[in-house]
Image (tube, grey):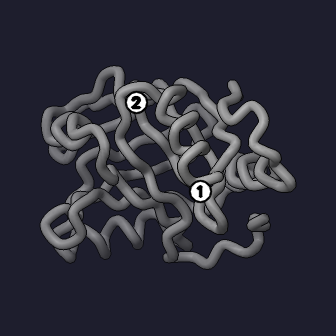
Amino acid sequence: MVRADEFQSGTVVQTAYLVDDVRTAAARFAAATGAGPFLVRRNRITDAVGPDGRPAMFDHSSAYGQWGRTQIELVQTHAAAPTEFADTTTEIGRVHHVAMMVESFAEQQKKFSDLGWRALLTATTSNGNAFAFHDARAELGHLVEIYEARPSILALYRRVAEAAVDWDGYEPVREM
């Protein structure tokens, strides 16, 4: 199990794949890889802006599971805006993003923007956690998500990792 205090800032902590149905994909992923169990929830992100500062949104369901030291997120998109971001959510069966916990959200956003990896969606969750999807597709083939290691994010990672301890494959898909 990965402990929350083991996360090293600036390293990848999650890989996320686009799927057409999170529950079906989670069951298949668990059967194929032994990862899991997967915890499913709906995420309606409405406190967001796009790259031009206009209002944005990302309504999606996620299934979170542990695969060794890496958290896996399976993402089913229900609706997304603006177009620049929505277009990244349509190719099922590929990596959508990798996620990094960072020391300073603002400093990392500036660093990525200076590299030419503009933020396609910058948002705040209902828990007050800021996150952003930066466009690294030209160099990496996917987006990079950033957020700070705040208590509610660490709690999510801890919950997913703890569910995987001594997991015997029973009930691979669970509601959060």
The residue type indicated by label 2 comes to: Gln
Outermost front residue: 32
Query: Looking at the figure, which quarter contains the N terminus?
Result: bottom right
Residue 134 falls in image quadrant: bottom left
Residue 142: percent from left, percent from top: 26, 59
Q: Give above or below for 35 relative to 44.
A: below
Residue drawn at 21 percent across, 63 percent down: 141
Residue 95 is left or right of residue 148, and the answer is: left
Q: Earlier in the sequence, mark 2 or mark 1?
A: 1
* Mark 1: secondary structure: strand
Residue 147: percent from left, percent from top: 51, 58
* Mark 2: secondary structure: strand
Outermost top residue: 78
Residue 164: percent from left, percent from top: 77, 51
Give the labeled residue for mark 2: 76
> Circle 2: is it few (<14), some (14-19), or many (20+) Cα within 10 Å?
many
Q: Can residue 165 be seen from the camera position used here?
A: yes
**Gap between marks 2 and 1 measured at Cα:** 16 Å
The residue type indicated by label 1 comes to: Gln
Give the labeled residue for mark 1: 71
Residue 174 falls in image quadrant: top right
Q: Give above or below for 141 relative to 38.
A: below
Observer-nearest of 176 and 57: 176
Residue drawn at 70 percent across, 47 percent down: 156
